Image (cartoon, rainbow, N blue to C red):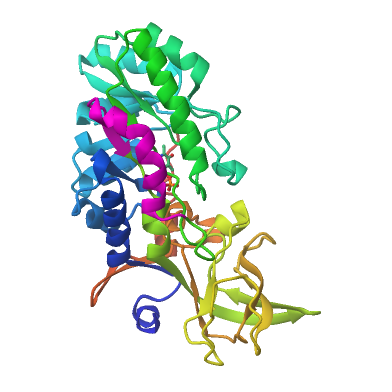
Amino acid sequence: MREIARTAGTPTFVYSSATLGGHFDRLKEAFAPLDPLLCYSVKSCANLSVLRTLAARGAGMDVVSIGELQRAVEAGVPASHCVYAGVGKRDDEIIAALEAGIGLLNIESEAEFENVSRLAGQLRISVRCALRINPDVDPKTHRYTSTGKKETKFGVDLERARRFFQKYGQDAFAKLEGLHLHIGSPIYTVEPYVEALTKTCALIDELAMDGVTIRSIDLGGGFGADYESDQSPSAMDYADAILPIVLPLKQRGVQFFLEPGRSIAANAGVLLLSVLYTKQSGEKRFAICDAGMNALLRPSHYGSFHFVWPVQPSNGLVPPTRSSTLAMPGLLAQDIVGPLCESGDFLALDRSLPPLSRGDLLAVFTAGAYGMSMASRYNSSPLPAEVLVTGGRVALIRERETVEDLMEHERHVTVLL
Ligand SMILES: *Cc1c(COP(=O)(O)O)cnc(C)c1O
């Protein structure tokens, strides 16, 4: 990390190819009886080199915009191995996805289906579609990332699903033939999946009575990652709960998709920062770093926990666990904050850490997913650099932005009206 900071500077996201690949392989192995197309969720960490690492292992991609589809294709994944979800697909995005030969369009509403049907008919391009159903289960996660309850904007509730197939099941070009679920993230127990899939199987039986055959099921993503302690089920734990419910469908020829993002990318990345200043205000100690919510939004947006530790602790202490309050001697309670003009600009609050001083390097753990992909340029902060470690090879996979880059799109002023 010290050598990476010396050569690439900070703030920098550092990813491990081995960890990315290891998580992918474990999911593939755990779900092997379903032989699913494992579509990595591009939005969790979208760097082209990360996508290529997973593409080389046979990953498909889960995309939620045409920009993400372009990235997937650029990384060598054919559009036919991509699934496309999202409540607000624009006409130009739908047309581009149809023309590229998208593998599966996940439909979120009646209005969207009618639009897809119209565009596919005009272009005379057939496309496989799956209806995103909202099974009304509580994934017991942050309300911002809970997506399978009735009051969220995603999918169609089960009562409407049957009518949906009756009304739209015979479309000439938009071939409605699958079901899609993605109920939230991160989901730390298997029960919400069990509940959602049990309801899905009941729906499939009802649809069969209507003469509708479901050919594919996209199980979504949402598997947990290890942020704090080993609280997350393993790939095998999720599979052990899910497989018994859906294997009978596999035997009837149903094709399966999975859309994991966080469980692959989260702990494959750390955010490397430098301490700019330390400061004490009353009893409160702050370490002010060269990035905060601009690089990693999760703590201030979701109240998420990320373990933070110095690259070279001043007192040599190595933490026994990642729990937030370590009862070790020689530690001081400190807030790890960023440089932005917001009190919400923090990465970690009230953490027991070795004494920090100016120039220390800090590693923010489990920052690979929804880190860089949610980073902003607030306060004219150039986006961090990204580095990928593959065995002994350390490669800069995204150059650090410059302020020149930020101003580039503002230099030329065009009078419109
Ligand atoms: C974000 C998202 C995923 C990935 O979720 P993770 O928690 O990162 O696994 C999968 N499918 C859809 C439709 C999503 O929006």
Q: Residue 8: horizontal and vertical position, in percent?
A: 36, 75
Seen at 58% across and 62% down, the residue is 305
Q: Quadrant of ligand 1?
A: top left
Q: Residue 205: horizontal and vertical position, in percent?
A: 38, 17
Query: Which contiguous range is marked in magenta?
Result: 233-257
In the picture, measured across the screen, residue 186 lies left or right of residue 78, that is right
In the picture, measured across the screen, residue 342 lies left or right of residue 251, that is right
Seen at 24% across and 29% down, the residue is 251
Seen at 42% across and 59% down, the residue is 266
Instruction: State the residue lying farthest toward the bottom.
Output: 315
In the picture, measured across the screen, residue 36 lies left or right of residue 267, that is left
Q: Residue 33: horizontal and vertical position, in percent?
A: 25, 42
- Please tell me in which quadrant of the rendered image residue 200 appears: top left
Q: Is residue 237 magenta?
A: yes
The answer, for residue 87, to whether it is visible in the render is: no
Q: Is residue 375 above or below residue 290?
A: above
Q: Is residue 53 above or below residue 4?
A: above
Residue sitting nearer the eye, 196 or 411: 196
Residue sitting nearer the eye, 210 or 404: 210
The answer, for residue 291, to whether it is visible in the render is: yes
Q: How many marks?
A: 0
In the picture, measured across the screen, residue 201 lies left or right of residue 356, that is left
- Please tell me in which quadrant of the rendered image residue 1 appears: bottom left
Q: Residue 313: horizontal and vertical position, in percent?
A: 52, 87
Q: Is residue 213 magenta?
A: no
Q: Is residue 157 above or below residue 8?
A: above
- Please tell me in which quadrant of the rendered image residue 6 appears: bottom left
Q: Of helix, strand and loop, which mostly describes the magenta segment?
A: helix
